[in-house]
Every structure is written in structure tokens, then in C-alpha cells.
Amino acid sequence: MNSIAVSTAMNSGRRDLVNVRSRSLLVAKWRVLWVVLGFAGIALAAIMRIAFLGMFSGMPSAADLAAALEPQRGDITDRNGVPLARAFPAYSLWFNPAALGGDGPPLVHSPAEVAAALGRIFPDLDVADMTKRLAEGKPGYLRRRILPEDANKIHALGEPALEFPRETERFYPQGSMAAHVLGFVGADGQGHVGMEEVFNKRLTDPATRGASAALAIDTRVQGALEDELSRAMADTNAKGAAGVILDVDTGEVVALASLPSFNPNLIDDAGEANIFNRVTNQVYELGSVMKPITVASAIDAGTVTDLGRRYQSSRPISIGGFQIHDSHSFGASLNVPEALIHSSNIVTAQVADELGGARLNATMRALGMDERPYIELPARGFPLWPPGNWSRITTMTVGYGHGIAITPLHLAEAYAAMVNGGIWRPATLIRVQPGTDVAGRRVFKASTSARMRQLLRLIVDLGTGRKANAAGYRVGGKTGSAEKPGNHGYQKTNIIATFAAAFPMDHPRYVIIAMLDEPQATAASSGQRTAAWNTAPMVGRLVPRIGPLLGIMPDATRDVDISDLAPLVGSGEGE
């Protein structure tokens, strides 16, 4: 009996324990359910609030939200990975007139007071226009790309309607450096003018989100080029300047500058006026820098075989009612090396005449001078090319650089072909991988190129290019000072001064074209306007700055052997 009672009591205890556990589990389940329902309610309220704000509040437009969801624009770097253009998060100033709710005014203070306060933060702000915009009460951007410290100042004004959405902006960390190469990204989010336009699809493609595009530009060399061009432009009071540095074996543009420049971070009226690219888009009659091309063509064709042969140089050439003359007399006769050293129009015209228009035309076509320059930039000028079969007078004048207008980039490509062994290659702003064999076309024989390296070095060693003779760098090149054409013929007071150079001439690696637009005679140029006194010295300063950066160290023990040419050369002075 006692055992039965004990057993019954134990069973009853077990049932009570089970019931307690069941009740506890049920309570726990209800608690979890209430917690889940609570969070769901909070989430639903948040979603409804967001929907309400999206439908009824002054939030950014659907286009702005769509833009925020687009892939971040990829970076543009130089050949060494230095960033030239990149995307970064920034604040904007957005006006949300519904932030206070209700039917009251959108601002705590008056529109005029708020506008005045914003004017103190942003000195360039049009306060009257801002007052009008705030008074209208329409939501929208008041300013793009503001600094965090400016956002803090605006926040301190105590105006809930002034909000600061974070967005992705385009930033150019090097400022105006290489601006004509890069271009800019407009308010529409699209690239304009330069490689931003060329790479627009690639940089925004979701499949390559964040991928960088590497250019051939070297920021160190670019900075040196811009600095020297700016100095030369200021020293001579020139209205503009242009320069390009080209790898003669790959066609890579390691530096390209057009001055005055613009700041792609802030495109204002002044910046828009300077967007035009003098290197690739403007064509010029470049004058005597074309003479070596004529001589190279004549050597290649076999019409010039004896460099000691003398041509009359004392009398102007009269043809078709036009006279070809030199800047001053160089004596009764000159040979080809002397003609290049002193920059004789009379002798070069005779060389071109013997060569003939058909062959000179063919050479210049092979150098790409009858079409837009080959480079990725969208702005590429079309040459002013003499039509039809060239007459004798056309051939002669083109031979010394008049009657044909090309871009400085055309000239750089031509000089590269003239010194690299005779192969023309198109210029490119895309970095070429080391060891890549870049295709080209033969224009000159290798022997002709070797002879031209001697002649160009001779010009710098003994002739008009002497001020470019940077010690140890074996610079070769040619000056050119061409009068600009006007409505009533050529303007004797306005010239284009150009120096076309290559270095080191015993094994050419780079071509440099430097140009000044309308330089004036100043004390810095010894009272002269010609290339021998302004662009040649500029290149003489530039080469020692960029040589070591490009792996070329000065070496006074090496040079081009010009011992067979030096005895042919007399004394004199040209442009």
C-alpha cells in the first residue's frame, strides 16, 4: 500500500514537472513571437516613413537616386600608377522645404537671412539668386561638392531644410596638370573633351566597376614640361604655348601640354575658354622645322647624294610672281648641312624642287600629314593640305614649311620616324606594355635615318639650335620661326616659334616639340622673337630635368659621330 502511494505521488510529481515545463516553453514562445512582431512593426513603420518621405518630401529626384546606384567611375592613372582622376565621396547641399512638416514656412529664418549666411560660407555664392531659390520653396541641389567643414558650418545655422546627401564626385588630384589629356566629367556625369570622354563607357561599365585606366603620361615629365612652357610663355609674353614628348619606338605620349590650361575640378568661364588643345586640334604653318623632312625625303629618293654639293644662296628665287628669300644673307652658296644649320629657305626650296612635288607629297602622306593625327583624343585637327598635284611653287614653299598647316603632334610623329630608323608609328595616350612590338610603316631607309641623326645633332652643335645643347644628352633638333597668316598675307610681327628635338641622338629615345604662339622680343629672349632664342633654350632646360626621370643619364663620353660633316660647315647665324 505504501509502495503504491509512493509510486502514485512520484507519477503526479512528474506530471506537474512536465506541465510546468510546457507552460514555461509556451511562455517563451509567446515572448519570442512578441519580440519578432515588435521588430516587424518597427521595420514596417520605417519602410512606411521612407515611402512617405520619398513620395511627399523634398528628397533627391529619381534621376539623382539612379545616378547614385550607377557603378563608381574608375580611376585614370599615369604610367606609374599615380592617380590623375578618381572618384571620391563628397557632400552636397540639398534644399528640402518639407523637412519641418506641416503648413508652415520651410525655413526657420527668412530666405534672405539664410542666403546671406550661406554667402559668408561660400564667398563666390550669388546671394540674390540664392535668396530667390529659397523663397520659391522648391526642393533641389543648392551646391555640389562641399567640404565637411562647410557642411558643419551650415549645420550650425539650425536649418533642418538644409541637408547634406553624400554622393560620388570626380576629383583631379593633380589640379590642372594634363588637363587637355584628361578632360573632365560634367554635371551630367559624362566625360567630356579628353580621355574622360574616350574612356567614358569603360570607366562606368558595371562589368569593370572600379577598374583603372593607365595612360602613357608620366606625371613627373608632364609637370616639368608644363613648368618650362609656362616659364617660356611668361618670359616672352606669348599668347599661348604647346608641347609634346613622344617615345620614338612606341609612339607613347609621355607628356602633352597646351597653355593656357584649365582646372578640371572647376570648369568656369575662364576654363571653358582654354579647353581648346593646341597640340592636337590646332594646325599651324610651322616653318623651318619642316626642312629636315624635305632633306630626308631627298636623301631617301637619291636626289641628294653629295652633302658637300653647293647651292646658290645669295639671290632670292623668283617663281610665279613670288620671291623666296632668306632672313639675311649667308653667302654666295651653301651645302645641305649649312642650309640646315643656318635655316636657308633658298637652298631648301632648290632641294625640294629637285625632289619634285610627287615625291615630297608621298613622303608627307606616309608621315600622316594629310589626315587628322592618330591619337585617342576626340579633338584632332585636320591639316591644311595643298590639293591636287603640287606645282613647283607649292613644292618649294611646302619644302621649307609654308603652305601646309599641321598640328604639333603631326610634327612629333614625323620626327620620331626620322630618327628611329625610319618607322612611322601613330601616337598613343594608352600605356604600352614593356616588350610590346608596336606596328608601324617604313617611311625612310635606315641609312637615311642615320644620316638625319647626324644632321640634327649638327644643327644643335653648330647651328641655330645651340641653346638646346644640354651637356651630355646629345640633343639634336631644328628651329622654326614662321610668320602667321592673316587677312592680308603673312604677319611679320606675329610668329609661331617651334623647336623640334630628339635625344640622345646616338640612340634616340624621345622626341620633344615645343612651340610658342606669338612670342614677343623681351629681355629674357635677348630682344629676339625667333625659336633659336626662346623655344630652343626651353628645351635645353627641359632635357636635363626629364632625362634622369626617363632613365637617360648624361654621358659626356658619347655622341653622334659628325666628323665627316663638320668640315663641310662654315660659320653663320640663322633663325
Image (spheres, helix red, strand yellow):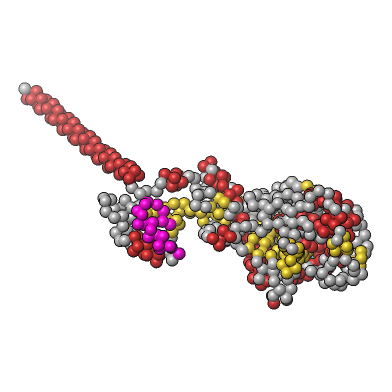
Where residue 347 appears, as percent x and y from the top left, is 87, 63
Along the horizontal axis of the image, is 126 left or right of 271? Answer: left
Decide which of 278, 227 is in the foreground and name it. Answer: 278
Where residue 252 appears, as percent x and y from the top left, is 69, 53
Along the horizontal axis of the image, is 374 left or right of 64? Answer: right
Tell me which corner region of the image, top left, top right, bottom left or bottom right, holds residue 315: bottom right
Decide which of 268, 446 is in the foreground and name it. Answer: 268
Compared to residue 16, the image places residue 554 above or below, namely below
- Please state, as top left, top right, bottom left or bottom right, where the C terminus lies in the image: bottom right
Whether residue 451 is visible, yes or no, is: no
Tell me which corner region of the image, top left, top right, bottom left or bottom right, holds residue 244: bottom right
User: Residue most toward the left?
Assistant: 1
Tell me which corner region of the image, top left, top right, bottom left or bottom right, holds residue 36: top left
Whether residue 115 is visible, yes or no, is: yes
- Please state, as top left, top right, bottom left or bottom right, where the N terminus lies in the image: top left
Q: The magenta stretch spans which residues?
A: 124-143
Residue located 40% across and 48% down the image: 60
Decide which of 244, 80 is in the foreground and name it. Answer: 244
Residue located 25% across and 37% down the image: 37
Instruction: State yes or no: residue 125 in magenta.
Output: yes
Residue located 51% across and 56% down the image: 171
Along the horizontal axis of the image, is 39 left or right of 211? Answer: left
Instruction: State yes or no: residue 253 in magenta.
Output: no
Where residue 398 appears, as percent x and y from the top left, is 81, 57
Where residue 372 appears, as percent x and y from the top left, is 71, 50
Residue located 29% across and 55% down the image: 105
- Number of numbered discs on residues: 0
